[in-house]
Image: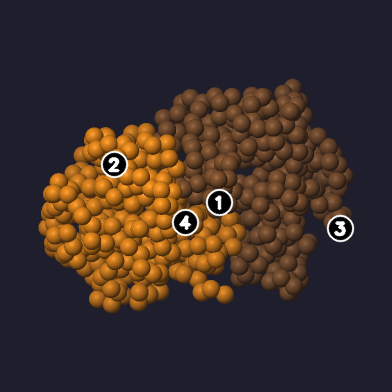
Chain colours: A orange, B brown
Amino acid sequence: MTKPIRVAVTGAAGQIGYSLLFPIAAGDMLGPDQPVILQLLELPVAMNALEGVAMELTDCAFPLLHGIETSDDPMVAFKDADVIMLVGARPRTAGQDRADLIKANGPIFTGTGEAIDAVAADDAKIIVVGNPCNTNALIASSRAKRIPLKNYTAMTRLDQNRAIGQIAAKLGAAPSDVKNVFVWGNHSDSMVPDFSLATVGGVGEGRSVTDLVGEEWLGGEFDTTVRTRGKAIINARGKSSAASAAFSAINHIHDWFLGTGHNDFVSMAVPSDGSYGIPEGIIYSFPCRITGPWQYEIVKDLEVSAETLERMQKSANELLSEREAVQDLL
Amino acid sequence: MTKPIRVAVTGAAGQIGYSLLFPIAAGDMLGPDQPVILQLLELPVAMNALEGVAMELTDCAFPLLHGIETSDDPMVAFKDADVIMLVGARPRTAGQDRADLIKANGPIFTGTGEAIDAVAADDAKIIVVGNPCNTNALIASSRAKRIPLKNYTAMTRLDQNRAIGQIAAKLGAAPSDVKNVFVWGNHSDSMVPDFSLATVGGVGEGRSVTDLVGEEWLGGEFDTTVRTRGKAIINARGKSSAASAAFSAINHIHDWFLGTGHNDFVSMAVPSDGSYGIPEGIIYSFPCRITGPWQYEIVKDLEVSAETLERMQKSANELLSEREAVQDLL
């Protein structure tokens, strides 16, 4: 029998967690033949609710779910974890600006980072979903001594998916026919959706998205819609994105493990290696190529316009100032 | 390309709906190669929230999701629908007894039944999830002139899954190793979980669950836990079962379309044909064998103990009195 993969999830009784755990147990993330053990972390105040979630997971009789563990202690929840999904974060309160949000979340991620490096599997893979995810991931990764820095990532896959969704809807195409759309930078409204290499159509018959819909829409309405989609969802639903964030996190881990299918690369926020002039020491969304199970590399050979490079730098500068705001935690 | 299957879902912006739609779009219900079009129905007051859900579905860029339609008109939402999942229902209010709940829901399902028979696909398959699901299904089916009565079903798969989950946990076995557990009767605490044919273990090496854990636990704690699980979930989560109900509805439709895998049969509440002395004219959970895509038959050749037969009759009597309570709607 295939050895189960241990998946730790924080904020497991929260809204994103509730949308995330069941599809993981159904095999959507790690494939239809890969058993999983879920290791769920919550705050002490949410342990009753988490127990209810665990009961519902048991009630589904998922064939691949070989165990459920619950804890309010990161040293227990991250023990031997192979995949760690950091979903829990302090949400933004009314009137709070981004800088305050960053400072409120920082201390959560120092403790998280220490526990991960202390007890997780040697080659654990980490995705941060809780916002501000790039800087939260940076804080957690600052505690990494044993686990490779490269394994700390943050989620911009939701932004990429939103971009693909908009293009597919505009063209009346299936989302699976839209290829090689990606996102640079911070998961904030400074992000840079990149459509310059995007194509639509079957293999060998792809046509340039830019040729089909034109720069005006792409540089205008499309760009704004993708960057501000989170707020639009809150306005419509009265709640922030949960299921779309959960399924994008599933996509992120799925592709990292099993490959990107028909896409040549995928958006992941990863520790910068200096490519494209983006400084090292921040976690930044790049197009990443999956070269094998749990192996990625930043795609380095892309032509980027001067205008895009300038916006990419602005997003990097935002991340540098976020880092400055939490400097005492690093 | 495979023709998309049109799946209509009511109560689509509710909690079960929110847990249901995304895995359907991911392929969990109809298989990894089957495109779907979602046709979502909500009350006028929830159309904003539904728009937000549709936006999030678009944002996932699901390869199999070939369309999303939203409406507050059943005649639009059920148009040409191949699969109809009736999730929306009026929840029980504080102090309301079951009889009042049944009367409050009845009128919803007469309108639903009329719209389905008027506009859905000729061979549409219906599952009622909204409670009291057996009698709601009966009311909807009472309007069937064009669509075969046999296509109207209600969900007891959650009860079956809960039973499997309890046995697997008791034995420390994987849920997939527990076979042929099923549920008779009404989806209420009169239901009869049946473990008499249940086995655990791989193919050809299955051992009787009764031999392994004993009648005392099965007839006592197990039976009570399965029948009252819904209340236990509410106590723990502070909310009723949503994701486990959603994934069980997915299981119900999946198996009806694609087969029961290693199980010989599966629990479905279907129009009684008089088997086991259960009167015709009610929708009752039987073990059902899937004989082909969208084909089921009630398993007729099972030996049932006198005690179980008596409980089965009690559950049937409850359904007869529920029918009596809505007689003017039929």
Q: Report how far apart the C-alphas of labels 2 and 3 lie in the structure.
A: 67 Å
Return the x and y of residue A329 as percentages of the image width and height: 17, 63
Q: Quadrant of the C terminus of chain A?
A: bottom left
- Residue B303 tag number: 3
Q: Quadrant of residue B315?
A: top right
Circles 1 and 2 on the same chain: no
- Residue A21 tag number: 4
Q: In the image, what residue occupies the spot 74% across and 22% down? A: B328
Q: Nearer the viewer, residue B49 or B185?
A: B49
Q: In the image, what residue occupies the spot 38% across and 75% down? A: A121
| Three-letter code for the amino acid on which mark 1 is drawn | Asp
Label 4 Cα crowd, 10 Å radius (few <14 / some 14-19 / many 20+): many
Callout in the foreground (4, 1): 1
Callout in the foreground (2, 3): 2
Residue A212 visible? The answer is yes
Return the x and y of residue A119 as percentages of the image width and height: 35, 75
**Horizontal side, residue A263 vs residue A33: left or right:** left
| Three-letter code for the amino acid on which mark 4 is drawn | Leu
Mark 4 or mark 2, which has the lower sequence index?
A: 4
| SS for dot 4 | helix
Q: Nearer the viewer, residue B211 or A224?
A: A224
- Residue A210 tag number: 2
Q: Nearer the viewer, residue A106 or B122?
A: B122
* Pointer 3 chain: B
Return the x and y of residue A282 as percentages of the image width and height: 19, 61
Callout in the foreground (1, 2): 2
| SS for dot 2 | helix
